[in-house]
Image (tube, rainbow, N blue to C red):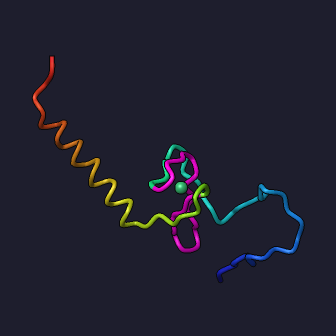
Amino acid sequence: MKDTPAPEDTTMTTQQPATKTVQRGFPGLQCFHCGHSDCVSLKLEDLALSCGECDVEITREEVDEHLARWQAVSRWLDAAPPTQ
Ligand SMILES: [Zn+2]
C-alpha cells in the first residue's frame, strides 16, 4: 500500500515541489543540527523526522534527549528560590 515516489523524477520541476502530501511540517520547531526554524518535517509513511535545511534525519532518541535536557532546566527552575 506504500506509494513511494521515485527519487529520480523525470518531469521538469522547479525548486519548490508543488504538493508534498507525504510530509508534514512542524512550524516553530528548530533543527537540532543546523539551528534553522520551520524546517523540520515528518514523513508520514515511516514517521521519520528530517530537516529540510541540512537534510539530516532527526531520531526519536534525539527528540527525547532534548526534551530531557529542557525538563531538567524546568525542574531546576521550579525548585529554585524565588528572586526579587
Ligand atoms: Zn537542519
Image-based side of 6 in relation to 50, left or right: right
Question: Residue at coordinates 78% horizontally, 76% vertically from top-left?
Answer: 8
**Count of numbered circles in the view:** 0
User: Quarter-wise, where is residue 60 in the image?
Assistant: bottom left
| Residue 28 to residue 14: above or below | above
Asked whether 43 falls inside the magenta stretch, the response is yes
Question: Viewer-proximal residue, 41 or 35?
Answer: 35
Question: Residue at coordinates 51% horizontally, 43% vertically from top-left?
Answer: 28
Question: Residue at coordinates 58% horizontally, 51% vertically from top-left?
Answer: 39
Q: Which quadrant of the rendered structure holds the C terminus? A: top left
| Segment colored magenta | 33-51
Residue extending farthest to the top is 84
Image-based side of 11 in relation to 18, left or right: right
| Residue 7 to residue 15: above or below | below
User: Quarter-wise, where is residue 40 in the image?
Assistant: bottom right
Asked whether 65 falls inside the magenta stretch, the response is no
Q: Which quadrant of the rendered structure holds the N terminus? A: bottom right
Question: Viewer-proximal residue, 45 or 53?
Answer: 53
Query: Where's residue 83, x and y in %?
Result: 15, 21
